[in-house]
Structure formats: structure tokens, C-alpha cells
Image (cartoon, coloured by chain):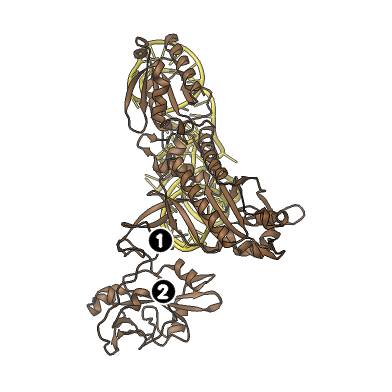
Chain colours: A brown, B yellow
Amino acid sequence: MRMSNLFLTTLREIPAEAETPGHRLMLRAGLIRKLAAGVYSFMPLGYRAMEKISNIVRQEMNSAGAQELLLPALQPAELWQESGRWFKGGKEIIRFKDRNDRDFCLGPTHEEVITDLVRHEVRSYRQLPLMLYQIQTKFRDELRPRSGVIRSREFIMKDLYSFDRDWAGLDVSYNRMYEAYDAAFKRCGLKTVAVEADPGMIGGTDSMEFMAPSDVGEDVIIVCDTCDYAANREAARIRPATAETEPEREMETVLTPDVRTISQLTEFLELPADRMVKTLVYRAGEGRMVAVLVRGDREVNEVKLTSLLNLGELAMAEPEEIENLTGAPVGFSGPVGLEDAATVVVDTDVAGMRNFVTGANAPDAHFINVNIGRDFSPDVIDDVKLARPGDPCPKCDGSLTEQRGIEIGHIFKLGTRYTEAMHATCLDENGTEQVIIMGCYGIGISRLVAAVIEQNHDDNGIIWPAAVAPYHVYIVQITPGDEEQAALVQQFCATLESSGIDYILDDRDERPGVKFKDADLIGLPVRAVIGPRSLEGRTVEIKCRRSGEEKKAALADAAMEVKALLGGDAFVSTV
RNA sequence: CGGGGCGUAGCGCAGCUUGGUAGCGCGCACGGUUCGGGACCGUGAGGCCGUGGGUUCGAAUCCCGCCGCCCCGACCA
């Protein structure tokens, strides 16, 4: 491709709208352009990188035994009503009516459509297992699109669905996808961590997210410094602290006028926060109240709490609700005497404490020397606190660390969540109808492009991994009109082509500095320069974008040198 | 949805306080000099000053409404 023909304008200045390094570079390098909030065009260069990524993913899905198809983005409401997600699924579904006043949506995901398809086509267990996938545009009316193509309202996703006759089959499909994901991300030059995740509203038993570690990631991931334990903070478990053994003392009331917060209380009682127990009051669906006890220096993990109690909704209670429940204003809540009016949940660490401090459910009063069992009885004891760095690992003696990550893949064991609601069944050997067991597996393809750039750039621009670079080589002819140089360039291009290496030839009538700057910004893995210095020995200057290493190569050897820099044959794949 | 910020040329911004009909840099077009890390000189094109209303002789500027965009939070496969 000649630069003079390429539909590309690079930006010298940083667009004001972009905050993250990757988003800025994608705009500056002319990979994407914005149409509206969270809605982007992919320009030829950006699209080409995305196509290379799609092809890698496609190859890995195919070799895992999956088949590609294409499902409609336009979906009738009836399917979503059948699965129960038309109203629950909520605000992010883009809905509208057709001319006949029929409800439709633009597909945010395709569990319903694929389940509908499979229930019509699959009659027998002999047609299973089945893995079907597509690479297609998804639509979600995100509350807050951000960071360019990392969270957008229209995006490209690979979604794969597995159908098995039993749970053992699902385990096989799930593990096969796990391996395929790992392989695909590696090939894309992306560092990822697979973490335990909360299945959330989509339902199902197990789920894992593939995270690309990055400071601009929206998720916090918790990783053990010793073993392989890793989890999304929303789902991270923590090994309980060892139980205290001191003898129980008599519970007493202490007057604490206007002392409401833990920090006020530590000062007032001259006790550390880890001797206190916070009681947080939540309202679940249908007026059910939940009181959650965590140590004074900890936070509640609301996601863990929600899935633990299997609650559809959960919100902090309003001050009036707290006063109705406890008889005291906010700041004096405690578990004693609350058992009948609320579900009392105690964090595992609190369960091991003796003689702690809680609110007394009376204005301006706290209890000291509270003990579980004697003074109140919890309904549930479980791990409901938010993990933080330094916490003990649930699997080994190590301790947990924290980093941010971009979620680029998510795999779920759905089980019968959709197949049951939509009656997708098949007959087994005995002629008995069996509900099909399902899994679903997503990769955010357009997000992956952004994640690759977030992980691979420097101050001067993008540093594409060879396998996903829109082109492999950026060729600069220093003196555009020079015929001797042009002849060398032509020969060089021919050797690249015959080696399966693709390139951009910067043939613009610009000064060398401009071309070098654009070469760094666009960030193809190799830059090749042919100029006055090349003529005498018929050489090409070859520079590695990542290492900065530069060498002269004889024209005859140049293609081989380039290939070596690209990492050998494995990375050379044209779109 | 709550908080904050911003909408002026393709991009980055000034002008608004104190109303008088729009400017700078980059980019773009043309000519010339240049040419190994974003050159220089000259000429030029390009603007319902987000949008609707109001105040005024007169509004980019003051007032009110709406829309859009960005950030933080809430929320979220």
C-alpha cells in the first residue's frame, strides 16, 4: 500500500476528547474516528488490524471444533420476553418498534437467538456436542461509554455458544474454550490473566474473565503473589483470619454522643478500627432488609453479597429505613435484637472475633464486648468483604495483590438458564427428552484492538505486535523523486511480497522527519529506510520499532532480516 | 441518574468579565526556497461562534430552555 493512496490522516495534536494513552493514539494514528458518544468508525488501518485479530480468533475457534455462522442483529422482542430478559435485561437494550408497532431490539448479545435456532434444528443427542460462533456487531446503550473503543455502544464481538447433552460435556467444551482463548490472546501479543468472575445476571455456575492488565482498565483484579489464584475483585475470596480465643467479657452499653463513624469511634473509645464491627443496612427486593457486619476497617463486597443471598436487587438503605428498622439514626446500627426484622449476615472475619464493638440500635450509644451466639445469632456467616492488597490468599499461604485490567473475554457455564426457559431439548438414547446444556464465550474484538495498544505503546506511538499489525513494514524513501532510490525500493518491495510480508510505502513528497514521526506513531513493527546512503552498497536500513535496534542489510538479505524481526514465519499472515 | 467541565474553521485553542458583526497555531490548496527526526517565506480557501427563544439600536459575549461531548461516581456480559 502506498501512503499517498491510503485513506489516512494522522493528527499532530491530541484530540481533547481522549483521555487514555491508547485512545489518543488510536485517534492520532488514524485508526478510528468518532461519530457519537461510544460510536466509532474504523478507518482502513484500524480495520485491518481488527481483521488480523478476527482471523486469529477465527482460526482458534475453528481448530477448537466450532463452526462460524451469522445471526441477525435485529431481534424480535418475543424471544427476550420468553427468556425473561426483556425487562430484566434493562436499560442497555436498544429497543424500538417497526412500522407494524412490533417491538424489536438491536442485539446486545445472542443467547436468545441461538437458543431459538438450536431448539428448531437439534432433535437428537447425536447432533451434539455443537459449538457455533459469529463475529458481529453488538449494540448496548451503555450508561457511560468511555475510553474510545474500550467501552462503546456499538462494538464487534466474537460470541460462541456450546451445546452439550450433559454437564460433563459442558466441562469439556468450557475447558476447550479456555485453552482456545489463551492461545488466541497469546498470538495477538496480549498479556492476559484468567480470573474467577461473578456470573452476575447472565446466570450459570462458573465463569472466568480474561483480563488484559492495564492501568486504564475498568476492572480491579486480585492476584496471589504465590500461587495461581486470580479473581475479579467482585468475586475475589479471602482466607478467613484465625479465630480469637480470649474469654468473653460482659456486654456493656457505652454512651457515644454524636459519634457515628468508625473513625470518630476509634478516637472516642481509643480502640483500633479492627476492634469495631460495622453494621451496614441494605434493602433488597420487596422490602427485605439485610444487615451486614464487617470489621470496622473493611468494606462490603456488594456483588458477593448479592450472589450469596441470591438477591435480584440490592441498595444501601435510606436513613428513614434504617431508623425504622433499628430505632436509631444512621451511625448507631448493630446486630443485637435485629434478628427478626432483618437478615443478619456476618463476615467470616467477624465470626472469629471476640468482645467487639457495635452500634446499640439506640441514639448515641454503642455496645462493647459483643459476642456472637451469646448476644445475637446471625442468619448467614460468609465471606462478604471486599478484597484488598495484602489479604491472605484463599488457596495458599500467599498474599493477594491488586492491579487493573481490561476485560477482553468472558466464558460462562450457562447450564440450562436459557435452554430450559426456551425449551431447547433433544432426545437421548432412550428416547427421553433432555434439556440441552449450554455455555457461552465472548471476546470483545474491537476492545481487543484497544487493549493491544494500551499494552504496546511508548511516547512516540503504537508498537504493534507483528501478528496483529495492520502492515508489517513501513518503508521510507528519503528522496521521493530520486530514481536510483526508487529502483531499490521497488526491488525491496518485490522481495517482501514474495516472502508474504505486507508493507506501507511512504512515497509522499514530505521531509524525512515527517515520515519518521508518522512511522513511529503508526507503529508498524519494522521500519525500512532507503535513501542516499543506501545507494553505494545497495543496502536497506532496518529498524525494529520495539527495541529501537537498527542495522544495515544488503538488499538481497533484507527480507530475511525483516522476517527475523517479525518473529519468523509464525507471525507472517496476510489479511 | 448525581457531581464537575466543555461546545468558536478539519485539529488544538484565544476572544465572553466590560455587547459594536471573529482571531491565533497546526493542518489544507497554490508558488518559491529547502530536504536523514514534525522546515521557512509568500498567497489563499475554509466559520448558521452547538441549538431555540429572550433582553438590546446591536449578542460569540448578558438571561432562560434544549441538545451534544468529556471526566468522576452510581451502574454494567
Q: Residue at x 43, y 25 (%)?
A: A474
The residue at the far left in this view is A270
Left or right: A404 in relation to A501: left
Residue A416 percent across, percent down from the top left: 61, 64
From the image, tell me which residue sits under label 2.
Answer: A382
Give the class, few, some or many, for how many residues have Cα within 10 Å of label 2's Cα (few <14, many ≥20): some
Labelled disc at residue A247: none
Where residue A19 sits in the image (x, y, percent)? 41, 45
Q: Nearer the viewer, residue A492 or B23?
A: A492
Q: Earlier in the sequence, mark 2 or mark 1?
A: 1
| Place of residue A192 in the rendered image (x, y in percent of width and height, measured from the top left) | 42, 48
Give the residue displayed 46% in from the left and 38% down from the top: A26
Q: Which quadrant: the C terminus of chain A? A: top right
Tell me, yes or no, if residue A400 can be seen here.
yes
Instruction: From the viewer's side, name the closer residue of A501 and A485.
Output: A501
Mark 2 vs mark 1, CA separation in Å: 16 Å
Q: Is residue A16 visible?
A: no
Instruction: Choose between A371 and A419: the one closer to the eye.
Output: A419
- The chain letter under disc 2 is A
Secondary structure under tag 2 reads: strand
Image coordinates for residue A255, horizontal then vertical, percent: 29, 86
Q: Residue at x 54, y 70 (%)?
A: A312
> Chain for mark 1?
A
**In the image, is residue A456 above or below residue A334?**
above
Instruction: Identify residue type, mark 1.
Output: Arg
Identified by mark 2, the residue type is Asp
- Tell how many labels: 2
